[in-house]
Amino acid sequence: MPGINTESPMNEIVTMNHGSGGRQSHELINKVFVTAFGMPLPLTDSAIIEDAGHTLAFTTDSYVVDPIFFPGGDIGKIAVCGTVNDLAVSGAVPRYISASFIIEEGFPADSLRKIAESMAVEAQKAGVKIVTGDTKVVEKGKCDQLFITTSGIGALRHDRKGISTGVNVTAGDKIIVTGSMGNHSIAVLGSRNKLSFTTPVVSDCASLNHMINNVLEKCNNVRFMRDITRGGLSGVLNELAGICEKGILVDEDSIPVDEAVSGACEMLGFDPFYLANEGKILIVASPSESEEILSILKSDPLGRNSAIIGEIAQEGTGVVLKTVTGGKRIIDMPSGVQLPRIC
């Protein structure tokens, strides 16, 4: 399969697999951008910046979701939610967002207004301000309707700096997810291909900063957080295993998956653990606080299906799933792309 090959620069090409959030994405980022820019490892959802006595979290992301309107959201809502969540899982309080639009010639002005209004509503809900941006229009056929890039800045308390890097993760820590897996991917897939499900599937797209802040204000032993987007749960778990250099054991029976999503996956041949979400996060916390954190999450409408799904193992490496049948299997880092242009 063609891909990034640093030893043969004349043969280098980028494939859709490099946008999957899995193994090929990490290869592309590490071999090209980390090398060129001298980025520190491990990479986090937000850069942590010390400046003039202040600690800031700074993030940027681009959104190319297809279709741009889907059950539960649109490209504008997901752009705000994604930026807010990247800051919040770093332990920061999101403050300001910039938004840049690349618009294809012929794009309906009414659709653009709807997307801008959607962004404004979501920003207000999250308590952030969209303060600057840019607009470019390209010839018809030079982009697919509309692409949005957002950047965000948040304030970070000094005692929360280690959350994004997982430096405090230890054996025995519990792993929590804040809801059911795979809803966003299936909702977008259904809309893209005009599929009808017996039970409608709606994207989980949401800003989670208020729920996250409630946890952090009441609990002092959150070791790590990451939003479960491209690459799905399996991608985040494998990233975590690599960061902390420890094994991870998860219980399949404890991982929440809605019945409609499970049925769609069975019918279409997808694994919900590898599907993207846009309103779910993974939290690693000390055993002493895990139940309290779970209670806080369940008291929030966005976290009512939260569950403790496993723990950091005392020994071993990689991610091991205890199956519903009592066996065990390895959960690998995703390779290839199940669903392109999901965010």
Image (tube, helix red, strand yellow):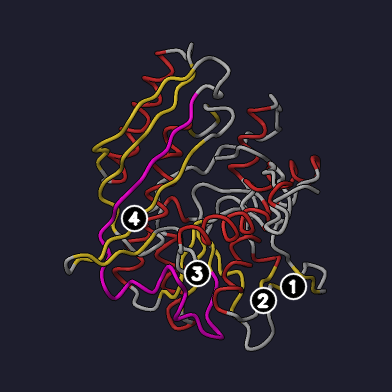
Marked residue nearer the N-terminal end (3 or 2): 3
Q: Nearer the viewer, mark 3 or mark 2?
A: 3
- The image's mark for residue 58 is 4
Q: What is the tally of numbered marks visible in this picture?
A: 4
Q: CA distance from mark 3 to mark 2?
A: 22 Å
Circle 2 — which element? strand
Membership of 174 in magenta stretch: yes
Callout 2 touching callout 4 (CB < 8 Å): no
Marks 4 and 1 close (CB-CB < 8 Å): no
Label 4 to label 1, Cα distance in Å? 37 Å
On the image, numbered disc 2 is attached to which residue?
Answer: 249
- Specify few, some or many for label 2: CA neighbours under 10 Å numbering under 14, 14-19, or 20 or more: many
Look at discs 4 and 1 and give the one toward the viewer. Answer: 4
Q: Where in the figure is residue 34, as x and y percent of width and height?
A: 51, 60
Label located before the other in sequence (4 or 1): 4
Residue in the foreground of this view, choosing between 301 and 59: 59
**Mark 2 touches mark 1? (CB < 8 Å):** yes
For residue 42, which numbered disc appears in the image? 3
Residue at point 44%, 27% (across, down): 102
* Magenta stretch, residue numbers: 146-175
The amino acid type of the residue labelled 3 equals: Pro
